[in-house]
Image: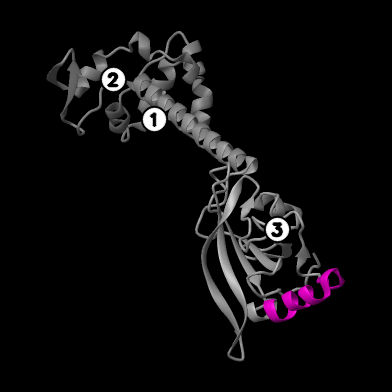
Amino acid sequence: MERFPVGFRFHPTDNDLVSHYLRNKAMLGDGFRSPYVSDCPEFYSSEPWTVWEKYGGNSVEDGEPLFFFIKRKKLNPKGSRFDRKVGTGTWSGQYFAKVMEEGKVIGIKRNFRYEGGSSSDQNNAWLMDEYELNKNDVTVVCVLRKNPTKPPPKTNETKRKLKDGVDGIEQDLDQRRKLISNLDQRRKLRGNYMPEKEGTSYREEQGGSSSSIDHHQASSSWTPKQEDYRPELAPDLAAADDFVFYTHDELLASTSKSNDFLDRFYEDNNFDQLVHKQVF
C-alpha cells in the first residue's frame, strides 16, 4: 500500500467509496487499481488479523482502517445470500444504511463484527464495513478496522512484557523485605527495649508480663541475647575483645563534659589517645 506524504491521510467518505472506487471497479474490473484500496482475494478464507498483518495493518496509526476490493461468495449459486464465514469465525451483520448522492440511493453500507472464532481474544475485536452498489453484486469495497471498544488481543510480545513487569515488581518487593529485615536486625543489635521518654521509665514485656523499670538501671544491666548477635552488621566491633556499650542517655549527658567522656570512651575501647586529641 502506498504511503502518504506527512500530514496526509486517506479518509474517503461513504459517497467517495461507492461513487468513485466501487463504481469504477465494477465497470473496469481488474483494469482499475488504486494504491489506497488493495485487491484481497483471500479476505474470506483468512482470519481478519492475518489479513491485517499481511496488508500492513501493523504500520498504520491507531484507529486507522484498511481498504479492500473483495469478491463475495454466494451460499447458493442460484440464491441471493452471501457466505459470511471467514477463517474459523463469521462476519455477523449488525445494521445497514443507504449511501445517498443528490437525494438518490447509490449504494448500501453494511456493518459487521467478527465472532465465533477459535480464539476468544479475537472475537468481537474486529469490525468490517461493506459497501455494495446493489444487493446482487459480487464485487464490494470492505473497510477493516480494530474494534476500539475492546482491548487488543494479548500477543506473545504483550504477554512477555506483562510477565517482565510482574517479575520486576516481585524483585522490588524482595529487596524491600530484605531492607526491612536488616533494619529489624540493627534495632535488635542495639537493644530489645525502647524508652518511652527521656528521664522516665520504659515498658518491657517478657513472657507476656509487663513491668515498669527505670531505663538507666535497665540499660546498665542489659546484655545482648544470642539471636541479637549479628557480626556481619558490625565486623569491626565483632573482632574486638573489649568494647564498651554506652546508653543513649549517657551520650546525651556527656555534652557538657565531652572531652572527659570521649577520653574515657576511647580509653575503654583501646583507641590511640594521641590520634583522638589531634582530631578533637
Residue 259: give its label.
Answer: 1
Of badges 1 and 2, the one in the foreground is 2
Which residue reaches farthest bottom? 102
Residue type at tag 2: Asn
Q: How is the image coloured?
A: one colour
Q: Is residue 208 visible?
A: yes
Please rate how many residues cluster around mark 3, counting C-alpha atoms within 10 Å: few if below 14, some from 14 to 19, many from 20.
Answer: many
- In the rendered image, which quarter is residue 266 located in? top left
Q: At x 78% / y 73%, what residue is drawn?
A: 25
Q: At x 44% / y 16%, what residue is drawn?
A: 269
Q: Which residue is mark 3?
A: 57
Q: Magenta segment, principal secondary structure?
A: helix
In the rendered structure, the answer to whether residue 245 lies left or right of residue 145 reads left
Q: At x 80% / y 77%, what residue is drawn?
A: 27
Q: CA distance from mark 3 to mark 2?
A: 66 Å
Q: Secondary structure at mark 3?
A: helix
Q: Earlier in the sequence, mark 3 or mark 1?
A: 3
Q: Is residue 191 above or below residue 44?
A: above
Q: Earlier in the sequence, mark 1 or mark 2?
A: 2
- Tell me the magenta residue range: 18-34
Looking at the picture, how far across and down is residue 150, in whole percent? 51, 55
Q: Which residue is mark 2?
A: 192
The residue closer to the viewer here, 212 or 59, is 59
